[in-house]
Amino acid sequence: AAKVIQRPWYAIWKSKRLMNIVTEIAGRMDWDYDGLHVIRGWKAQNKQMYPNLDADTSPEALVDKVPKLIKQPMRNLYIATNEPFYNYFDKLRSYFHVHLLDDYKELWSNTSEWYNETTTLSGGRPVPFDAYMRVIVDTEVFYRAKTQVETFNNLTRDCKDGINTCNL
């Protein structure tokens, strides 16, 4: 599909409209939050390439590891993730004020400024807030966190690009 559909990254990546959403999310947490980046999805299912990822990012493992990495309890914790199940991180709610991208859906809903601006720019056609845009916003909010806990640096022993690919 990438050879057929060319995404206009120059128009999307760090566009003013997406960065406005990032600013609004960070602002709602008073710009005082920690970030947790949890990669799951197909990588967690691929036990051959990532043998430990699923177990290392399970709710139980996160409850064991994250409070040790973010020592101040009940801080705002923004979780950037591709985990499709909203309640997956519920166990962390006993330790932190957990925020996920879906908590801010109204920022790109059909009544939002983003929706109105992008619809106008596209000649009246609504622009879906797709997976590419979700990744951009999630990543940018995560980068602004005071403490950043990453999947492959802090949570798992697996290498980012699969088994035996870690730089020694």
Image (cartoon, rainbow, N blue to C red):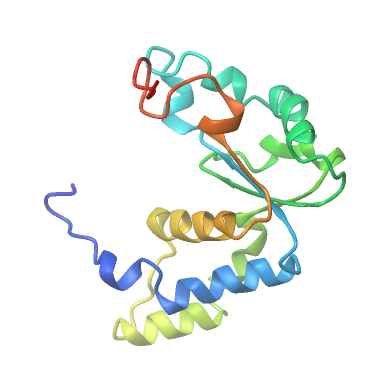
Find residue 66 and report its horizontal and vertical position in percent.
73, 34
Determine if residue 55 is in view. yes
Out of 145 and 16, give the one closest to the viewer.
Answer: 145
Q: Which picture quadrant has residue 118?
A: bottom left
- Lateral position of residue 123 relative to residue 77, left or right: left
Determine if residue 109 is in view. no
Residue at the image position 39 percent from the left and 74 percent from the top? 15
Q: Is residue 47 above or below residue 11?
A: above
Q: Is residue 156 above or below residue 141?
A: above
Q: Which picture quadrant has residue 29?
A: bottom right
Residue at the image position 82 percent from the left and 45 percent from the top? 96
Residue furthest to the left: 3
Q: Dividing the image into 4 quarters, which one contains the C terminus?
A: top left
Find residue 50 and report its horizontal and vertical position in percent.
44, 18
Find residue 113 and report its horizontal and vertical position in percent.
53, 83
Out of 136 and 150, give the one closest to the viewer.
Answer: 150
Q: Is residue 5 above or below residue 156?
A: below
Out of 6 and 29, give the one closest to the viewer.
Answer: 29
Residue at the image position 18 percent from the left and 49 percent from the top? 2
Residue at the image position 73 percent from the left and 35 percent from the top? 69
Find residue 84 and report its horizontal and vertical position in percent.
55, 40
- Lateral position of residue 74 relative to residue 150, left or right: right
What is the number of callouts on the image?
A: 0
- Lateral position of residue 19 relative to residue 100, left or right: left
Residue furthest to the front: 168
- Lateral position of residue 49 relative to residue 75, left or right: left
Q: Is residue 63 above or below residue 4?
A: above
